[in-house]
C-alpha cells in the first residue's frame, strides 16, 4: 500500500510550533493518480519508506525525518545510523537521566560520548557547540543489511536515492544527487 504523504505511525520528535513546516504533495499524489513509483517525481518528496509494519525501522526513521523536516538529518557512523534533530527546534529538550543512575546502566546513544566530551570541554572554559543536536532514533549498523544507490520513477528521468535495507525487511530511500558515490564512501569507511 502506498500512502502519500507519509502519515506518522509511531511517536516521533515534536518541533516547536515556530519551526513546523510541511510540504504539501502535488494534487496528483494527494488524489492517488499516479502509476507505480511515479510519486518520486514530486518536488516535495525527500524519501520513501517501504515496510510491512509501522514498527519496522524504515518507518521509525521516516516518522522522525518527516516530523522534524529540515531540522533533521540522517547521520551514519561506523557503529550506528540515526536521525539527528537540531535541539533548538525541538518543543522541549529530552530530559537527562536521573543523577543517581549509574552511567553504565544509562545505555549508549549515538552522540552520548560526544555530549560528554562537549560538557568536559565547556567545563574547562571551551566553547559549547553553536547548534547542538538530539538523536531522535538510531539503530546499530548490524540492523542494516545493505546501503546502496537506487533509481526510482520514470525510466527516462529517474530520481536517485540512497537506500538503506534493514534486517527487518524494511527499506528507507533518501533522495541524494550522488547516491553511488555516497554508498561507496560509507562502505569504505565501514571497513
Image (cartoon, rainbow, N blue to C red):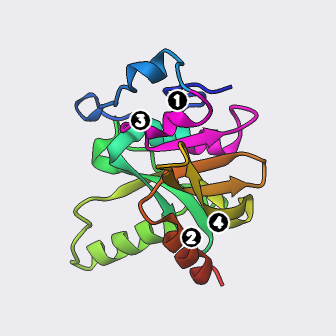
Cα separation between marks 3 and 4: 46 Å
Q: Is residue 35 left or right of residue 16?
A: right
**Residue 104 numbered tag:** 4
SS class of the residue under badge 2?
helix
Residue sitting at x 51%, y 33%: 39
Cα separation between marks 4 and 2: 33 Å
Q: Point out the tag, 3 or 2, that comes first from the N-terminus.
A: 3
SS class of the residue under badge 3?
loop
Q: Point out the tag, 4 or 2, that comes first from the N-terminus.
A: 4
Residue 66, above or below 187: above
Give the number of the mark in front: 4 or 2: 2
Pick the front one: 115 or 16: 16
Give the number of the mark in front: 3 or 4: 3
Q: Point out the tag, 3 or 1, that comes first from the N-terminus.
A: 1
Give the number of the mark in front: 3 or 2: 3
Give the number of the mark in front: 3 or 1: 3
Q: Is residue 100 magenta?
A: no
Give the number of the mark in front: 2 or 1: 2
Residue under label 2, please give it. 183
Which residues are drawn in magenta? 35-61
Residue under label 3, please give it. 42
| Any part of residue 162 in sight | yes
Cα separation between marks 3 and 2: 24 Å
Q: Is residue 68 left or right of residue 8?
A: left
Residues under numbered marks 4 and 2 in contact, where contact means CB atoms less than 8 Å apart: no
Amino acid at each position: 500500500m502506498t500512502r502519500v504523504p507519509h502519515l506518522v505511525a509511531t511517536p516521533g520528535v515534536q518541533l516547536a510550533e515556530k519551526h513546523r513546516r510541511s510540504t504539501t504533495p502535488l494534487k496528483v499524489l494527494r488524489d492517488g493518480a499516479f502509476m507505480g513509483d511515479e510519486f518520486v517525481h514530486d518536488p516535495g518528496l525527500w524519501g520513501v519508506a517501504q515496510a510491512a509494519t509501522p514498527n519496522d525501522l524504515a518507518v521509525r526513521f521516516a516518522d522522525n525525518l518527516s516530523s522534524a523536516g529540515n531540522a533533521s538529518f540522517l547521520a551514519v557512523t561506523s557503529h550506528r545510523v540515526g536521525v539527528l534533530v537540531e535541539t533548538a527546534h525541538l518543543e522541549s529538550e529530552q530530559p537527562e537521566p536521573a543523577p543517581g543512575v549509574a552511567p553504565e546502566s544509562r545505555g549508549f546513544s549515538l552522540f552520548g560520548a560526544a555530549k560528554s566530551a562537549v560538557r568536559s570541554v565547556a567545563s574547562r572554559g571551551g566553547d559549547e557547540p553553536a547548534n547542538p543536536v538530539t538523536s531522535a532514533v538510531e539503530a546499530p549498523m548490524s540492523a542494516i543489511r545493505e546501503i546502496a544507490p537506487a533509481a526510482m520513477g520514470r525510466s527516462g528521468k529517474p530520481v536517485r536515492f540512497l537506500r538503506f535495507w534493514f534486517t527487518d525487511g524494511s527499506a528507507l530511500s533518501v533522495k541524494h544527487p550522488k547516491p553511488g558515490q555516497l554508498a561507496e564512501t560509507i562502505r569504505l569507511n565501514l571497513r
